[in-house]
Image (cartoon, rainbow, N blue to C red):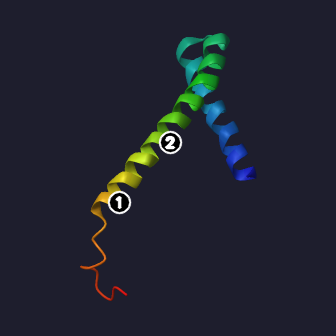
Amino acid sequence: MAKTLTFGVVHMTVAFTVAYLMTGSVVIGGALALVEPAVNTVAYFFHEKTWDWVRASRRPSEATEPFAA
């Protein structure tokens, strides 16, 4: 859990720094640092669901797997 939390802090810090350097605005940097990770989290959820679907659709049937019990 600590690794996840520290990565969240790093992610938000990077988002803020990039936005601040590009705009010079603390407000825009702060807003982006809060909004971008939240949107990215939702996108990641759907990305994982899509890959679960891809893996399931490519899984060979048990009848064709070698050494199937």
Give the residue furthest to the left: 64
Type of residue at label 2?
Phe
Q: Which mark is residue 3?
A: none
- State left or right for residue 33 relative to residue 45: right
| Residue 7 versus residue 42 in the image, above or below | below
Q: Residue at x 62, y 36 (%)?
A: 11
Give the residue furthest to the right: 2
Q: Count the labels in the image.
A: 2
Q: Residue at x 31, y 77 (%)?
A: 62
Residue 69, given in percent of the width and then of the height, sits at 37, 87
Q: Quadrant of residue 58?
A: bottom left
- Eye-nearest disc, 2 or 1: 1
- Kindly identify which residue carries mark 2: 45
Residue 30, given in percent of the width and then of the height, sits at 66, 18
| SS category of the residue bearing label 1 | helix
- State left or right for residue 55 relative to residue 38: left
CA separation in Å, label 2 and label 1: 17 Å
Q: Residue at x 60, y 11 (%)?
A: 24
Q: Quadrant of residue 23?
A: top right
Q: Quadrant of residue 41?
A: top right
Q: Which mark is residue 56?
A: 1
Q: Nearer the viewer, residue 4 or 56?
A: 56
| SS category of the residue bearing label 2 | helix
Q: Earlier in the sequence, mark 2 or mark 1?
A: 2
Disc 2 crowd rating (10 Å Cα; few below 14, some 14-19, many 20+) is: few
| Residue 60 versus residue 36 in the image, above or below | below
Type of residue at label 1?
Ala
Residue 66, given in percent of the width and then of the height, sits at 28, 85
Q: Nearer the viewer, residue 36 or 50?
A: 50
